[in-house]
Image: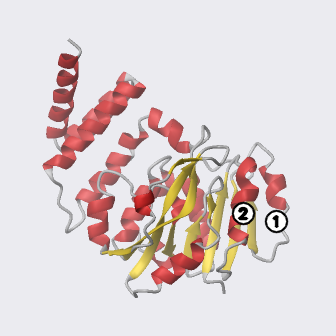
Amino acid sequence: MPKISVIVPNYNHALYLRQRIGSILNQTYEDFELILLDDCSTDNSVEVLLSYKDHPKVSHLVFNKQNSGGTFKQWEKGIELAKGKYIWIAESDDWADTTFLEKIINGIGTSNTIGLAYTTSKLINSGGEVTFENEEQNSNELIEHKGIQFISEKLLTSNAIWNASMMVFKKDLFYKLNDTSFKHMKYCGDWFLYVQLCQHTDVLEIKQTLNNYRIHSNNVSSEAKKLGMYFTEGFRVFEYVSRIEGISIPIRCLYDWAKMYQKADREYHFPKELRHYVLKMFFNYNPLINVFVYFRIILSNLKNV
């Protein structure tokens, strides 16, 4: 039985698949199975994936006849097929350093309480060129966080694990989730999943850049931001977090939501219906957020006078 199950959920990323899969098969840590999933791609992804069907590391090759409607449903399918103790969801358009798994597994092994570990990432564009890299996050430092502390400091109003490819977690944590609705989300399902995983484990932060996160026009995140999903879905995650025992919500956090909303609305010009929906969510949680929103709008208008 493999120690790690590597899940590659793909949709229309034929251009990047060989680099993605190659970076997995060339890992220095070799005790893994590879699960390849395609969500009814319309490019030549099927052809690329079929070229790996006889590889000894490939345990499953699954092609959906109909698109599932969301990548997080594919995550769940992969986890259900997985035989490994650990799960690595390796997004189909990213790629990893060949020592990624070795260093993740070595890190997890430093403590019996750690069930989730992640590294830092470089941002790359569609051509593979580096667009952002924080050298301060490449210090080789290992930082252990208590789960609730990590949620409070890293997952309160945003997702510090901003790419699934940079993270590995114990499979058994998945079956301790309180709420499986993450799989129906379009954008923030990863954030919601990580919050719930961290309720049951400590977290290891590995400050070494071992993942390459590709940002391009076909990313789900690019379109989701324009549709306001950071608020329609992300605020639901925040509401869940605020109900976790041991988590306190400072006033500053409410102001941050107002600030993020006002900035996003100014950039993307949300339609009236979306504005009403989000502001109603804010009001139902705490009307003070709405006060902050209108305060920032008034302040912005005064600056333009």
Quadrant into which the C terminus falls: top left
Label 2: which secondary element: helix
- Where residue 272 appears, as percent x and y from the top left, is 35, 22
In depth, the one of 189 and 267 nearer the eye is 267
How far across and down, in percent of the image, does residue 110 sit? 43, 86
Judging depth in this view, the residue of 247 and 286 nearest the camera is 247
Residue at position x 32%, y 32% from top? 263
Crowding around mark 2 (Cα neighbors within 10 Å: few <14, some 14 to 19, many 20+) is many
Q: Crowding near pointer 1: few (<14 within 10 Å), some, many (20+)?
A: some
- Which residue is the site of mark 1? 52
Question: Mark 1 and mark 2 in contact (Cβ < 8 Å)?
Answer: yes
Residue 162 in picture, x, y percent from top left: 45, 55
**Seen in the image, is 119 located left or right of residue 214?**
left
Q: What colouring does the structure picture have?
A: secondary structure
Q: Check disc 1 and report its element: helix, strand or loop.
A: loop
Q: Is residue 266 left or right of residue 244?
A: right
Name the residue at 65% across, 70% down. Answer: 98
Residue 190 appears anywhere in the view: yes
Q: Is residue 204 left or right of residue 125?
A: left
Occupied quadrant, residue 243: bottom left
Q: Is residue 220 above or below residue 190?
A: above
Kindly identify the amino acid type of the residue bearing the numbered disc 2: Ile
Q: Label 2, label 1: how many angstroms apart (C-alpha)?
A: 9 Å
Q: How many marks?
A: 2
Q: Amino acid at mark 1?
A: Tyr
Q: Quadrant of the N terminus?
A: bottom right
Sequence-wise first label, 2 or 1: 2
Q: Is residue 179 visible?
A: no
- Identify which residue is drawn at 63% across, 70% down: 6
Residue 227: x and y, percent?
A: 46, 33
Residue on which disc 2 sits? 21
